[in-house]
Image (tube, rainbow, N blue to C red):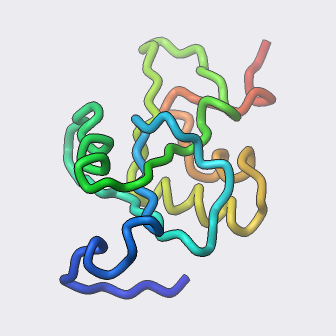
Amino acid sequence: FQMDTTPESYLDIFPLDAIVYLTPDSDNVLEDIDPNKVYVLGGLVDESIHKKLTLQRAQEQSLQTARLPIREYMVKAVNTRNYHSETLAINQVFDVLSTYYATQSWPAALKAGVSPGKGYVLPDAVKE
């Protein structure tokens, strides 16, 4: 994958209607990757999770939002901490997107990027 860095804001480089801000708080499920769109990953880098902050930021900038289809393809795993989180690190989101782009399979992509520590697993990984 080719990457460029710039001090400019993505808002100044790309048309607003081409930007999709990925946030776990979006109501919109990312169903496919559109090569004509620009996906913002890690719009907020922080040590703690601030619920709906990325969604609020995207809405303030009039951007489309989407979330990864974790709930659609994965199930909550039984765990002692009762911990379940759809918030992923930037590298995990990148792994999910790049694997999906290569395989066109959400289960394969989510397995590649969502660690079991997040409390979600693919249905076939649930032991009865």
Q: Quadrant of residue 123?
A: top right
In the rendering, at what x and y percent does residue 16 appear? 37, 67
Front residue of 118/64: it is 64
Q: Residue 91 in the image: state x and y as whole percent.
A: 44, 60
Q: Which quadrant of the figure contains the C terminus?
A: top right
Q: Residue at x 39, y 74 (%)?
A: 15
**In the rendered view, does 83 fall on the left or right side of 70?**
left
Identify the residue at horizontal 59%, vertical 60% (top origin): 97
**Residue beneath the point at 23% across and 75% down:** 9
Q: Position of residue 69 (x, y in %)?
A: 61, 40
Q: Is residue 35 above or below residue 111?
A: below
- Asked whether 91 or 69 is in front, the reply is 69
In the picture shown, does residue 75 fall above or below 19?
above
Residue 6 location in percent, x, y? Answer: 25, 86
Which residue occupies the foreground of this view, 71 or 64?
64
| Residue 29 placement, left or right of 128 | left
Q: Residue at x 44, y 65 (%)?
A: 17
Q: Specify the quadrant that holds the N terminus.
A: bottom right
Quarter of image, res 74 = top right
All told, the count of numbered labels is 0
Nearer to the camera, 50 or 116: 50
Relative placement, left or right, of 58 versus 95 is left
